Structures are given as structure tokens and as C-alpha cells.
Amino acid sequence: MGVRRAVDMALDLQRLNPPQPIVTYGPLIHNPQTLQLLESRGIREVASIDEIRGGTVVIRAHGISPQERRILESKGVDIIDATCPRVARVQSVIRKHAARGQFCIIVGDEDHPEVKGLLGFATSGGLVISSTEELDRIESLDPDREICVVAQTTQEERTFNEVVEQLRRRCARIKVVNTICDSTRKRQTEASRLARQVDLVLVVGGKGSGNTRRLVKVAQAQGVPALHVETAEAIPASALTGVSCVGVTAGASTPNWQIQRVIFALKQIGMRRIAGPTRVLRKLADVAVMTYLWAALAGGGLTASCLALQGREVTWLPLAAAVLFVISMHLMNRIMERSGAMQFNTPEMAAFYATHRSALTALGVLSCLGALIAGWWLGTVSFLLLCGMIGAGLLYTVPLGPDIWRSRRKWTSLKDIPGSKTPLVALGWAMAAAVLPVVGSEHTLNVSGVAVSFIFAAGMVFWRTALSDLLDIQGDRIVGRETIPILIGPNRCERLLVWLLVFLSVLIVASSWIGWTTAAGYWLVVNTVGYGICYRIYRGRHFVDRLSFDGMLDGNLLLAGMICIVYGAM
């Protein structure tokens, strides 16, 4: 949490245009690849306070000493404190006990920047001990003096307990506060459990990360080989010889995209989570998700739901128009994407598009033509509306205006408008599902039914897309994409999604009860509940991987269509 928070603060700061330059005092986190990305965004690291001349200074996640903070304040620079809240708690504990005159012993690595900062709070004296072998250093202390013992937040639990046990035997007056971060404790426990189930453990993280190195030792303590790798390219193929099962874990400062790249590299080498016929089915399912065929079927399911809500017969032509529209728009916009966020969010998908770009472009063009033909068969009004929808969709990623004009503006296309992606995707799907099939119909238009089904469709697609944006928030921040979760914050976005599900549930039940829509609204509560289950899975991080979870989100909309087809047949 603390590492992710620090990186997010730095990237958000760069997006908001603070006083320049933006520097971090010391490495923001212990991950070289992330630091390179920050530098590419204009956020550079300085090793000494003397190098700071002005602008904005970001205090690293490890924190700094009070003395260093006073020097920074005297320089008149803007200070952004990205100290991990867990580290700030340890600072507070040391400050409180030092004010009582207690000597502070920190169990940790003396050269670690977090520990150096913590020592600055020990105004009544302090000492760093990394193991029981260093306990002789406290012989000069008065045995009757009060001592406070804390831990570096990423310290190994076993080492801390051993040092504390020995200190209790030597010191009469001792106060112990276990300040090891819960995330660190859980990570080490899980690494130990993982090591007992596999032939090899890969620990992903920066070579300078102390907690990552400890994870290697934790795994090796179980008698299992463990490799510490920074990147996917660093995996030696020879290490996998004779290995049937690999476990992957990572240090606290390792971003998700780096872990995903390692997993993808293992798949490329030949490691798979599953084998046999199931492996082939899984590969086909992944391709369906990556090509948006599964999402397109979800669009067809949503169209069937809207037709059922309006009391209309579910026929193949409007379903085909919606399916072809969804796959063409998503494919074409993904192919024309310039931000590069996909390589961080779903590296497997990025590699797939790089390899099959020509075939996917052809599929997108053919789907677009197919959608127009289906629209023509639906009627003139439907065809013209579909032309407008496709035109608007294609314009989403196209740079607008001459090069000179674009170079002077932050927003060069509709895609660059902050938060535009999610509502525009929801609007496009809702138009295809709720309006396109009926706008040119000879039957009497059920205005209330169209309105309710449009709101339901837009709300469900907004929910699905915003949750995907929450999963992509790390990569989107890196490339500077301003999605809704980034604009309003992930916590507010989650609350918005919860209340949106409540609203949609009430809407379809109330509209069916009033008579604005058919009784299909009662049945569709299954799908709002389905998204509630998806949200719980997201919160618990229980999904196996990103493609599976995306398939689950779109599968819920496909299920809605199947439910309404059954309802119409009754």
C-alpha cells in the first residue's frame, strides 16, 4: 500500500502541473524499472539535499529524519510527503518514547533509508541491530535504563522475535512495539506456504529491495530453490530445466505490471497453469476476450435484455448489429491506441496485438462493414444512426486539428478528455442495445421502456468499464491517461459503483412494478447481483488473472441476454 501510494502521489502530482522541477529526495521506492518510468515522466531523483534548488520535492516512501525535513523547509520548496503511513506510525512511536527519555533499538538494516530516517526521531539515543549476533553492542547501556524496541516495517518476523527474546533476558525495563507491516508479515507467510507447493520460487523485485531479498531467504528456508529476478528478461531458461511447477511472488515495491510480465514470460517459455484439453479451451477463451468477441457477445446479450424490457420480440438482426458494432469499435480503437497503457495493464494482450495487428485490423474493418449492412436491413433511420455511432467511435482516438494546434494543447483527441472513456463506451453500447433496434420500427414506440432500458444498459456498461479502469489504474497513471478512478480516486469510484448497482436494481424492479417495462426487470436483478459478486471478487483479489476476470464481467451481460430469451419463450 505504501509503495503504491507513493508512486500514485508522484504521478498525480506530475499530472496536476505543480511548481517545477519535480524531484524525489532519494529513490522514491526500491524498484529501478518504476524509477525509470518516473524519470521518463519528468520526475527525477536527487541523492543529496544540496542538489535541490527549488520546485517540488517528494519525500520517498521510506521517510526522512526531522533534521532533513527542517533543511528542506528552509529551502522554501514545496514538499509532498509520500512517506508510507506504516513508516509514519513507527516514527510516531519512536518520537513518543524518546520524549519519555527512553533509548530506542531498531531491529533492521542500518543502511536502509527507512532506518536512517527512523534514527533521526530517537532524540534520547538509538541503535540499529540486524541480528542476535549484534546484541553485544548494547553492553555499554545502563541495564536499568528504559528501552523501546521497534522494527523496520519490512523486517523478517523471525529475526525480530529472536532479537526481542534476547533483549528481554538482558534488559530489565523494555517496551516492545512490533511495527512490522501486516502486508510484509502476510507476504512472508504466503511465500513460505507457496514454497512448500512448488519446485522453484521466482521472487520479482528490485535488487536493492530489502524485503524482496528476505522473501528469497524465506522461500529457501523451506528447502526450495529461489531466484531473485528484477525483470522477465532476467529469468534464466536453464533454471526451469526439470521444473514442473513454478511459484511467483514479489517484493512490496514491485508493481503489478512487472509481475504480469514475468508470468507472461513463463507462459512463453512453456509453463502453464493448466494442461491437456483444458489448456486448449483456455487458450481459445483468452483469444475470445482479447479480440473482443466475448465482449461483442455481451453486447448482443445486453440488446436482448433491452428488447425484453421494452416488450419486443428478440430477433437475430438487432443482436447481430450490436455484436458487430461492439467488436468493430473496440478492435479499431485498441489498434489505434497510442498511449501504450496495454503493455502495463495486460502485457499478454499487448504481445497478441503486436503479433496479429494486420489480421485484427481486417477483422475490425469487416465487423464495421457487417454492422452497417445489419443497420441497413434494420431500416434507414437505424442505418443513419449507426453511421453516426461508428463515425463518433472512430473519431475517439483520431488526433483533431493541425499539428501546430495540437502541439499547444493538452487534449489532442476525444480520448484525451479526462474521464471520457467510460461514459462514452457506456453511451455507445446503450445506443446499440436500447435505441438502434427500435428507432426505425413500425411498431408504437414505448418511450418509458426505451428510456429505462437505455439507462439500464448504460449503467451496466459504465459499471463494467469503470471496474476495468480500477484494475488498469496503475498502467493508466504511468502513461498519463485520466480515467474516472484516477480523477475521483479509487475509493470514491468504488462507492460510486456500489450505489450504481443499487440504483439499477431499484430502477428495473420499480419500472416493472409500475408497468413502464415488462416483468423481465425482475429477472434482470440476477445480473445486478452478478456484478455485486464480481465486485466482491475484485475486492478480495480472488480472480486467477485479468483475462479471466474480464471474461467474467462480460459473461454477466451475456447471461442477461440468455435470461431474457428464456423469459420471452415462457
Image (spheres, grey):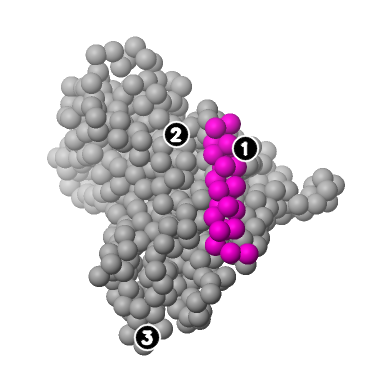
Residue with the mark numbered 1: 39
Find numbered disc 3 in the image and state the secondary structure of the residue it sits on.
Answer: loop
Q: What residue lies at 35% left-to-right and 61% top-to-bottom?
A: 561
Please tell me whether mark 3 or mark 1 is closer to you in this view: 3
Residue 478 position within the rendered picture, expressed as x and y whole percent measured from the top left: 56, 44
Instruction: Give me the disc on residue 14.
Output: none
Please tell me whether mark 1 or mark 2 is closer to you in this view: 2
Say if mark 3 contacts mark 1, CB within 8 Å: no
The alpha-carbon separation of the residues under discs 1 and 2 comes to: 25 Å
User: Dot 3: within a 10 Å radius of its alpha carbon, few (fewer than 14), some, or many (20 or more) residues?
Assistant: few
Find numbered disc 2 in the image and state the secondary structure of the residue it sits on.
Answer: helix
Three-letter code, disc 1: Glu
Residue 262 position within the rendered picture, expressed as x and y whole percent measured from the top left: 40, 29
Does 472 appear above or below 486?
above
Say if mark 1 contacts mark 2, CB within 8 Å: no
Residue with the mark numbered 3: 515
Three-letter code, disc 2: Glu
Front-lying residue, 375 or 26? 375
